[in-house]
């Protein structure tokens, strides 16, 4: 399969070295919940869609109109990539490559995928910790200054992981933020935790109170996406993240 | 693959069955539910969870006929891969999650090795 994924832009949006935030459906739907919240609270407009003949034949209806399930929202300084469908394993590489090439063409200065990292006793965790995978000293500093713990060794699986790797190859700064979360249940609290760190990195002021207050509602609405995502996570071997990596020095 | 619902106002909760040593552990996510609204029935082979939501929930803009449905409760029935010891089951409800411990029924007999 070649790179059949394309970014279809709509209208002219002037971008000024924006940052890009992504949240594909993954563990606890942390990134998906967080990116929907960002789009809503920052009142971002859709500026592009991600399309491919290899995507499932799905169109989402919002406000009475059909839209693509993978969309890019944004303003001058910020791009937010959302997906209403889980990404199949066979598409993860081409989506990641295409997105990062597009980011490069738009002079994106920092890419931040948002996700979850499963905690086996999540019910006992009051304040989910946020961890990061950083790609250079510059992004290390971004994490250190904001008390984000660094993942030093391990295996990271999924589209977000491929995106930071593509960013590294393309010399775009990237930082993968992951909040401790439920693995198989939507986790709005973890989405709130990751947004709080994002606020500090990008100097945003996105309120997260609503994610907590409307958490139960969000969990009901996210049930089906969570179930579909769970099947994909199994397919891509997400459980490898719990495996001890072979170390060599 | 979807979780499911029906026109009578039932939603199927997200539920997972985990086999851990001598027991099965069932976890169910039950938003808007209070402990008093939960009913769990268990036999050797089947678990049934019913849970009343503390409020009606309606997706006012969703779909076509779904718009008119008010969801009021969760319902889930599941079958165990092997019989469980009904008398030893226990459950707890914390932060919207129902966790049920279901010890496996011990069967068989020791075989002497010669």
Image (cartoon, rainbow, N blue to C red):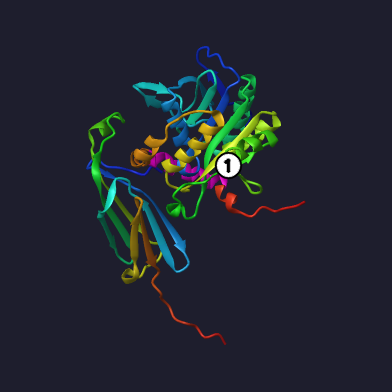
Secondary structure mostly taken by the magenta-highlighted segment of the chain: helix
Q: Is residue A25 visible?
A: no
Q: Quadrant of the N terminus of chain A?
A: top right
Answer few, some or many: residues within 10 Å of disc 1's Cα (few below 14, many 20 plus, some between 14 and 19).
Answer: many
Coordinates of residue A70 in the picture (x, y in percent) = 49, 28
Give the chain letter at badge 1: A
Q: Nearer the viewer, residue A61 or A216?
A: A216
Q: Is residue A228 magenta?
A: yes
Q: Is residue A116 visible?
A: yes
- Tell me the magenta residue range: A222-237
Q: Which residue is mark 1?
A: A148
Left or right: residue A225 compared with residue B72: right
**Residue A157 position by quadrant:** top right
Up-down: is B21 above or below B55?
below
Coordinates of residue A7 in the picture (x, y in percent) = 56, 22
Up-down: is B37 above or below A192?
below
């Amino acid at each position: 399969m070649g790179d059949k994924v394309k970014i279809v832009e709509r209208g002219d949006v002037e971008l000024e070295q924006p940052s890009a935030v992504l949240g594909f459906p993954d563990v606890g739907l942390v990134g998906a919940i967080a990116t929907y919240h960002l789009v809503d609270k920052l009142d971002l407009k859709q500026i592009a869609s991600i399309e491919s003949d290899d995507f499932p034949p799905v169109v989402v209806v919002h406000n009475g109109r059909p839209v693509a399930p993978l969309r890019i929202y944004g303003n001058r300084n910020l791009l937010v990539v959302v997906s209403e469908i889980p990404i199949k394993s066979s598409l993860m590489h081409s989506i990641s490559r295409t997105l990062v090439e597009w980011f490069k063409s738009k002079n994106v200065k920092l890419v931040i995928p948002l996700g979850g990292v499963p905690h086996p006793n999540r019910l006992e965790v009051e304040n989910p910790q946020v961890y990061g995978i950083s790609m250079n000293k510059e992004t290390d500093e971004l994490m250190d200054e904001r008390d984000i713990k660094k993942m030093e060794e391990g295996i990271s699986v999924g589209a977000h992981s491929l995106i930071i790797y593509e960013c590294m190859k393309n010399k775009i700064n990237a930082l993968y933020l992951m909040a401790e979360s439920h693995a198989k249940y939507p986790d709005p609290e973890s989405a709130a935790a990751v947004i709080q760190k994002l606020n500090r990195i990008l100097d945003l002021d996105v309120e997260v109170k609503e994610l907590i207050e409307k958490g139960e509602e969000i969990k009901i609405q996210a049930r089906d996406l969570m179930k579909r995502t769970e099947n994909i996570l199994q397919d891509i071997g997400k459980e490898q993240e719990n495996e001890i990596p072979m170390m060599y020095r | 693959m979807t979780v499911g619902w029906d026109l009578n106002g039932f939603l199927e909760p997200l539920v997972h069955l985990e086999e851990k040593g001598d027991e099965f552990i069932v976890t169910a996510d039950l938003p808007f539910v209070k402990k008093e609204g939960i009913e769990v029935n268990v036999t050797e082979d089947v678990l049934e969870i019913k849970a009343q939501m503390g409020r009606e929930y309606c997706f006012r803009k969703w779909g076509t006929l779904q718009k008119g449905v008010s969801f009021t409760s969760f319902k889930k029935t599941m079958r165990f891969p092997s019989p469980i010891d009904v008398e030893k089951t226990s459950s707890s409800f914390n932060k919207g999650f129902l966790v049920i411990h279901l010890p496996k029924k011990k069967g068989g007999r020791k075989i002497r090795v010669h």
